[in-house]
Structures are given as C-alpha cells and as structure tokens.
C-alpha cells in the first residue's frame, strides 16, 4: 500500500463495539469513516469530498438495513465505484446470496477474525483499484482510437468514426436532424482494373477531400471505413450530397465520363437517437442496394423493403473493356433513302461487336447493359470518333461525303458535355457539322426533359442536325412534339405495325397519318425506320412520307460495302442546302401532304410554282417545279444559279416584291398577291403575277409557296 495515499474505508454498523473493533484493526492502513445506520452511510458515500474506497456493511440495522443500502447504491450507481464487503451474523444461504445479488463483493461472517478482515479489505481495495486503473487505460485507449485518422484519406478510420458518432449522440448535443450517409463507389474494383490502383487512390483521396471541405466548420463527422466505403454523419442536407456528386462527376471526366464509377449514397435519417451509429450505417447501406445501375438517381433513403440486385453483368463489363482495348468494336452503316426515287441520302452508324470468340454481336445484346451500368459513353465516343475518321478519309480520297447519323444515349448526356465533344471532333477531323447527324432516342425525353433539351439546343446551335429516334414508341405523345426542338422525326415502324390484322393495320396507318399531319404543321421532316415491305412504302408515300431506312432498301452493312455502293453517283441524292437542284426532281408531296395530287397534276393545275423562304429579311427561292423552270428558261435563265438569282433581279426591279411575301405572312388569310416587272437578261420586260401563300415559320425561316403567271400579254 503506497505511503503517499491512504485509502478510506466506511464502517457501517449499529453496534458501537463492532465499529470500534474494526476501527482498531484497520486504522493503521486506512482512513476510517463510521456510520451507525444505512441513512448515515449513504450520506457519507454521496459526499464526493470523502472519496470512500470501500464500504464494510452490516445487514441488520435500524432505520435502514444493509439490503436497502445496497439497493440504493445500485440505483444511484454508487456500487460502480465503491466496493462493498458485507459483515453479518446471518448464515442463511439465501440471505447471503441476496447480498451478492445486490452487488456486494465479499461476505464476512460474524464473529470475525480481525487479521482476516484486514487482509480481505486490503485485497478488495487493491483489486478494485487495479480494475479502475485498467478501465482508465481502456477509456484512454478508446479516446485515442477516436482520434485515429486514416493515413490515405485523412478521415477517421472505422472504429474512430463510430466511436465519434456514438459520443456525439450520447452527449445529447445534437439539436437538429442528422443523417447517416453510407457512400460506396460503384464498380470500384473495375475502376482499379481499368485505370490502376494509383488512380484508384486518387479517386478515394478526392472523395475524402470533398467530404472534408464541404463539411468544414460544421459538426459533421466523416469516416473512411476502408475499401471504397465512406461514411458521413452530419446535419441533414441533401444539398451537401448534391455538391459532392457534382464534383465527383466533374472529376470522372478525365476517365472518359464513366458515371458508372460514380459513388452511390445511402441515407438513414436519424430523427431519434435510439439507434447507435453502426446500426444507422447498416441501414444506410441497405438503402443503397437499390441504386446500382440507376444513373438518374444516385441517392436512396432508407426504406425497410428494399431488394438487392446482383448480376454477372460485371463479367460482361470487363469483357467489353477488353474488347475496346482489342478494337473489336466497329460500326456498320445502314443507308437512308428517298422512297420516291430510291436514292441514298445518308446513313446511320450502328455499332457492332466483332467478338474474338462469339462472332458478331448486335448492340441489343450489350448496349442496354452498358447503359444500365453507365458505361455506354466510352463506347459511344469511340464510335463517334471512328465515324469522323471515316468521313475524313472518304473526303481525303476525293469523294463527296453523305451525312452520317450517330446514336447518342441519354446516359451520354448525363456523363458530360455532348455538344462540346462533337464540336471537338469536327474540329479535330476538319469536318462540317452538316456531315454528322445526331440521333437521340425519344425515351430520353421522358426522363430528363430539360437536360436533354438543353443539350439538343446546343447541338443545333453548333450546326448539327438532331433526329428524334424511335418516335412512336411507348412514350410518344404528339403534343410533346410542340415542345421538343429537333430537326427530324425518326418514326419507327416497329411500334406501328401495319402488318397484323386489318383493324390493327388501319390503326397503325391512322397513327402515322396523324403524326405526319402534325409534323407537317410544325414543318418537321420525317424519316421512317424499319421499313421492310413494299406495301409499307406505298402506304407511307401516299401519306406524304419521303425518307426511309429499312431492310426493304438496305440492311446495315460494313464500311467497304457502303463505300462501293455510294461510289455510284446515280444511287445517291445529295442535299445542296437551299439550292434548286436540276437533277433533284420536285416532289410537291414533301410539302403538301395529300394523296389526291400527283406531281404532274400539280404542275398542270397550278402552273409555274415555287417555294420561297425569307431568312434574316432575305428572300430566296427554295424549290421550283418544271413549269416555273420553263418560264424562266424561256426568258433566258437556263442554269440553276440563274434561277436563284432571278429572285434578286425581281427584288432589284421592284421594291415592293418582298412586300407581297410580308403581307402574306402578316395577313389573316396567309395569302397575298401582286404584279411585278421582270427584266430578263435578254432585255425583254415581262409582267409577272405572284400569288403567295405563307406556310409556316420555324427558327426564323419563313416558308412560302407561290404561283407565278406571265401576264405580259393580258
Ligand atoms: P436504332 O438507333 O433505332 O437503330 C435502328 C435499328 O433498327 C438497328 O438495329 C437496325 O439494324 C434496325 N433496323 C433497321 N432497319 C430495320 C428493318 O427494316 N427491320 C428491323 N426489324 N430492324 C431494322 P441495331 O443495329 O441492332 O441497333 C439497335 C439499337 O441499338 C439502335 O436502335 C440503337 O438504339 C442502339 N445502338 C446501335 N448503335 C449504337 C451506338 O453506337 N451507340 C448507342 N448508344 N446505341 C446504339
Ligand atoms: Mg438510331
Ligand atoms: Mg431507332
């Protein structure tokens, strides 16, 4: 027993003699306090200044007996730090046992042997002291643990994180609502495989930095639990999660926009503190099980009824990566044709996987899986670039290019700036945006309307034509066309099968009819895909459709075959923007949706006839029919260019010529007419009568049709 510290013993006995004896035995080693009954005893023990180290307790006492003292000591947790030895004449086992049950450490039977009492008191005090030391050490250790920080990330490590959370919860200092967030990086193992462990560490570091920075100055606790698992215990804020999300998506840009590697966030709302931190975290993890593969929503809040999704899709994903490295992916081209003359006007690039063992795999087998897991963007960007490369090489070989359309998945739009990427590509390969058309599937709009619309706007501003792919599939509504600003509608026959029974067939036709009607009203051209049979071609052309893509004309084909095909110029129809084209026949049906008129009828009935356009206050001729052509060639204008400049000549001579068009567009009846004098190069003056009808305005372009009569001799 150390000289420097004297332990204190409280002797509780109603007998003065017993107290004296015990005092005599123990006073050499201990400082002695005495109490004659239970009430006195408790008063002394509650007095923190007295620092009692042990209590010798009699059972049979007036006012309050030993059992009651033990009970109160339990209730007030005094028994936790003051050990009790009972000294009693009671021998009955039940009664002895009861004192042990109430927390007494030892039992000494009266009459006692003084030396033995001294020994047992000494032993108990020392034992208890040792225990106390041990528990101090333990506590110190725990506290140290709570400050233990993971080296790689600078965040609290596993045990420390939960210790810190529990300490905060127990402190009762939480005033607002908190949430526990489990953060897990999807496909992180794959990330390490693809980019290497070092990049993996950089990723972890970045996520840790995010957590630290965005929670600095708050009571939030951030932990790195090992592997790709992070945890956050913080005042409830979904905005905080959004911030982290945005920064990580930005960071993933340098890994090819693979949002499939983005973190998932499972949230447990800690409304009451009944749960300990570990349990909250476990629930947050459960919440997350719904997220993998859902790239629209990376955040899930705990709901007890969640299911877990598994998959051997991972094997497929690794195989895709291998295939990309081995350059097994390529694209086929499927021509788009003008149904009225069967000529090729462009093509769509469709990806194919030339698998080293499985042969040619069509996109239906792997594109949806890549989309589900957020990895389509790597592949898409690769294909887009391959298409640009091919166009470049085709032009370098002295050929005229045809516009090639590529598919853009909605995932691409989430993953990065699609418009910027296309601009980068055309710059890199020195192409014009008119050579690349962009197909975005209609279903994309159903999910992320505003984001898709923004991307489409930017693409169009950059000069790309955007096609709304798969129109007619489940999501479509005709009214949606009013809000979507695309250049071309791609109507899918698949969804409107005209083959089955008569009733269905008629229904399909009437759907196409109303889509065509609506798109004409909006001035939106249509291309029909999935055209397989002649009867479909007939129905479609009757309804006023002109362009198609389908097995009836061509199946998707390898590049070499496509090149062979378009080397033959007679099979190709090239659009020379806004020019009257000699070799391009006029098909009024493109403009007037009707199956009553044929081209020749219109030529005969309407006479000379042309379409005009006003763009930025400039009037230009867009298309003319044969009779119009005849009128002007008789006047000496024979070439295409002369036909075009004939308008300028008209305007030069007649300041009010353009007024006829302006009147048409502003008048209620949409029509207007007027006479103008035309001075031909031959030197003859002609009086021409124009009857103009305003068709529509789209993106600052006003379209008119007009009849022209030579009334010189009238
Ligand atoms: P999509 O963009 O609507 O492409 C048209 C699909 O219809 C192609 O299937 C084409 O081969 C098929 N097709 C064309 N004409 C006919 C026909 O007359 N009858 C029938 N039954 N089918 C016809 P494919 O090549 O298997 O592509 C399927 C889908 O995979 C595409 O539908 C597109 O959504 C997607 N896809 C293809 N290539 C890519 C790509 O590079 N990136 C992305 N993100 N998706 C792609
Ligand atoms: Mg497509
Ligand atoms: Mg399609």
Image: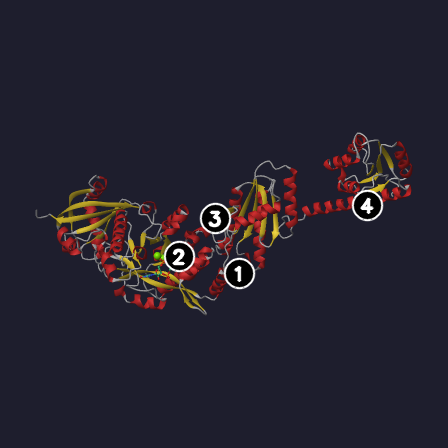
SS under mark 3? loop
Which disc, if any, is residue 297?
Answer: 3
Are there few (<14), some (14-19), or many (20+) residues within 10 Å of tag 4? few
Q: Nearer the viewer, residue 98 or 402?
A: 98
- Give the spatial CA distance, label 3 vs label 2: 32 Å
Q: Nearer the viewer, residue 355 or 662?
A: 355
Question: Disc 3 vs disc 4: which is toward the camera?
Answer: 4
Q: Which of marks 3 and 2 is nearer the N terminus?
A: 3
Asked whether disc 3 touches disc 4, contact meaning CB atoms under 8 Å apart, the reply is no
Residue 402 location (% of width, % of height) = 32, 60
Q: Which of 329 and 627 is in front in this view?
A: 329
Where does the N terminus fall, quadrant-wise?
top right
Residue 578 location (% of width, % of height) = 26, 53
Q: Which of marks 3 and 1 is nearer the N terminus?
A: 1
Residue 426 location (% of width, % of height) = 40, 57
What residue would you read off at disc 2?
Answer: 426
Asked whether disc 3 touches disc 2, contact meaning CB atoms under 8 Å apart, the reply is no
Q: Which of marks 2 and 1 is nearer the N terminus?
A: 1
Question: Disc 4 vs disc 1: which is toward the camera?
Answer: 4
Residue extending furthest front? Answer: 92
SS under mark 2? helix
What residue would you read off at disc 4?
Answer: 127
What residue would you read off at disc 1?
Answer: 194
- Give the spatial CA distance, label 2 vs label 1: 28 Å
- Give the spatial CA distance, label 4 vs label 1: 59 Å
């Amino acid at each position: 027993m150390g000289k420097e510290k004297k332990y204190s013993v409280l002797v509780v006995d109603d007998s003065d003699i017993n107290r004296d004896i015990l005092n005599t035995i123990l006073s050499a080693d201990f400082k002695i306090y005495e109490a004659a009954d239970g009430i006195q005893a408790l008063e002394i023990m509650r007095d923190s200044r007295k620092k009692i180290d042990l209590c010798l307790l009699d059972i049979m006492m007036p006012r309050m007996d030993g059992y009651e003292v033990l009970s109160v000591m339990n209730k007030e947790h005094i028994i936790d730090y003051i050990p009790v030895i009972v000294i009693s004449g009671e021998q009955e086992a039940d009664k002895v046992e009861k004192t042990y049950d109430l927390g007494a450490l030892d039992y000494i039977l009266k009459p006692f042997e003084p030396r033995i009492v001294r020994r047992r008191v000494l032993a108990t005090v020392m034992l208890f002291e040792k225990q106390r030391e041990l528990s101090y050490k333990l506590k110190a250790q725990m506290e140290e643990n709570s400050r233990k920080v993971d080296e790689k990330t600078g965040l609290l490590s596993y045990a420390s994180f939960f210790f810190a959370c529990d300490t905060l919860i127990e402190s009762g200092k939480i005033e607002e609502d908190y949430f526990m967030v489990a953060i897990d990086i999807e496909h992180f193992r794959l990330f390490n495989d693809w980019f290497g462990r070092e990049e993996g560490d950089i990723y972890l570091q970045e996520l840790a930095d995010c957590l630290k920075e965005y929670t600095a100055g708050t009571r939030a606790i951030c932990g790195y639990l090992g592997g790709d698992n992070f945890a956050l215990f913080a005042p409830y804020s979904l905005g905080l999660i959004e911030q982290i999300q945005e920064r990580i998506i930005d960071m993933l840009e340098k890994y090819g926009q693979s949002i499939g590697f983005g973190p998932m966030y499972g949230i447990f709302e800690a409304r009451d503190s009944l749960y300990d931190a570990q349990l909250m975290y476990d629930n947050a993890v459960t919440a997350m099980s719904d997220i993998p593969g859902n790239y629209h929503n990376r955040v899930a809040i705990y709901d007890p009824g969640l299911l877990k999704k598994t998959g051997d899709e991972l094997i497929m994903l690794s195989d895709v990566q291998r295939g990309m490295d081995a350059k097994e992916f390529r694209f086929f081209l499927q021509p788009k044709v003008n149904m009225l003359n069967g000529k090729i006007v462009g093509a769509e690039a469709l990806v194919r996987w030339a698998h080293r063992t499985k042969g040619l795999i069509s996109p239906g087998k792997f594109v949806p899986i890549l989309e589900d897991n957020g990895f389509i963007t790597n592949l898409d960007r690769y294909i887009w670039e391959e298409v640009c490369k091919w166009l470049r090489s085709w032009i370098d070989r002295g050929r005229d290019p045809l516009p090639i359309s590529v598919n853009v998945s909605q995932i691409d739009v989430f993953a990065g700036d699609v418009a910027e990427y296309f601009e980068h590509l055309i710059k890199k390969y020195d192409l014009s945006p008119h050579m690349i058309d962009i197909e975005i599937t209609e279903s994309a709009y159903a999910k992320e309307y505003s984001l898709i619309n923004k991307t489409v706007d930017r693409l169009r501003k950059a000069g790309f034509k955007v096609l709304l792919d798969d129109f007619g599939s489940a999501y479509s509504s005709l009214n949606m066309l009013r809000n979507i600003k695309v250049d071309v509608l791609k109507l899918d026959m698949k969804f409107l099968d005209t083959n089955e029974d008569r009733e269905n067939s008629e229904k399909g036709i009437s759907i196409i009819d109303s889509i065509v009607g609506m798109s004409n009203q909006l001035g939106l051209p249509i291309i029909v895909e999935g055209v397989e049979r002649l009867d479909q071609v007939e129905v479609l052309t009757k309804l006023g459709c002109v362009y198609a893509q389908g097995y009836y004309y061509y199946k998707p084909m390898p590049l070499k075959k496509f090149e062979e095909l378009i080397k033959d110029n007679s099979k190709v129809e090239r659009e020379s923007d806004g020019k009257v084209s000699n070799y391009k026949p006029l098909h009024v049906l493109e403009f007037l949706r009707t199956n009553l008129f044929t081209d020749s009828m219109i030529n005969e009935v309407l006479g000379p006839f042309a379409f005009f356009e006003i763009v930025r206050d400039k009037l230009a001729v867009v298309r003319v029919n044969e009779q119009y052509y005849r009128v002007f060639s008789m006047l000496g204008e024979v070439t295409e260019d002369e036909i075009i400049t004939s308008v300028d000549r008209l305007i030069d001579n007649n300041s009010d010529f353009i007024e006829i068009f302006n009147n048409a567009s502003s008048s209620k009846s949409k029509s207007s007419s007027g006479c103008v004098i035309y001075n031909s190069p031959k030197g003859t003056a002609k009086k021409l009568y124009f009857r103009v009808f305003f068709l529509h305005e789209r993106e600052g372009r006003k379209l008119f049709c007009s009849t022209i009569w030579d009334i010189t001799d009238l």
